[in-house]
Amino acid sequence: MTLLCRGAVEPREVAEALLLHDDSWGVRALDDGPMLQVCRDATHPVITVLGVRRVDSLDEVVRILPGAPTLNVPLWWVDTVTPTGADGESGISAALEAALDLDAVCIVHGD
């Protein structure tokens, strides 16, 4: 999934917005880096925030996501991934809800 945020965000803010979906979930950093994984428990991730990038040209958004809505720039592009199955479905639901809190558009890719 991709979140296109109208305001500046950091990976931690995105993870915190995802946690609002279920207050029993937790967050862990991957490889001591900027990637954060939201998990329902120690062995079941529901969504991973891969990173955040500022985008200053709508042409770049249209090139990569041709179906994306027209948004004002700058915007902040957040890449996320979810596992397959029920945990991934929970991650998608959380991302859709988080988009409201982050003033973002959530684009779900794939099946």
Image: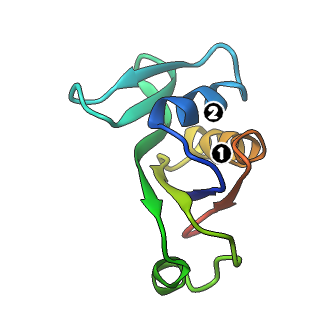
Residue at the left extreme?
31
**Quadrant placement of the C terminus:** bottom right
The mark found on residue 95 in the picture is: 1
Judged left or right of residue 82, residue 19 is right
Q: Which residue is under mark 2?
A: 18
**In the figure, 69 relative to 1: above or below?**
below
Q: Is the Cβ of the residue at disc 1 closer than 8 Å to that at disc 2? A: yes
The answer to which of 59 and 22 lies nearer the viewer is: 59
Q: What is the quadrant of the N terminus in the image? A: bottom right
Who's the residue at 65% across and 31% down the image?
17
Q: How is the image coloured?
A: rainbow
Horizontal arrangement in the rendering, residue 79 relative to residue 75 (left or right): left
SS for callout 1 = helix
Q: Amino acid at mark 2?
A: Leu
Nearer the observer, 54 or 102: 54
Amino acid at circle 1: Ala
Q: Dot 2 lies on which element?
A: helix
Packing grade of label 2 (10 A; few <14, some 14-19, many >=20) is many
Residue 22's quadrant in the figure?
top right
Q: Is residue 22 visible?
A: yes
The structure residue drawn at horizontal position 56% and vertical position 63%, both measured from the top left corner, is 74
Residue lying farthest to the top in this orientation: 24
Q: Is residue 31 left or right of 56 when viewed as pictured?
A: left
Q: Position of residue 105 (x, y in %)?
A: 70, 59
Q: Residue at x 76, y 42 (%)?
A: 97
Image location (x, y in percent) of residue 15: 54, 31
> How many angstroms separate mark 1 from mark 2 (CA)?
6 Å
Residue 7: percent from left, percent from top:
63, 49
- Check the image and report above or below for 66 versus 61: below
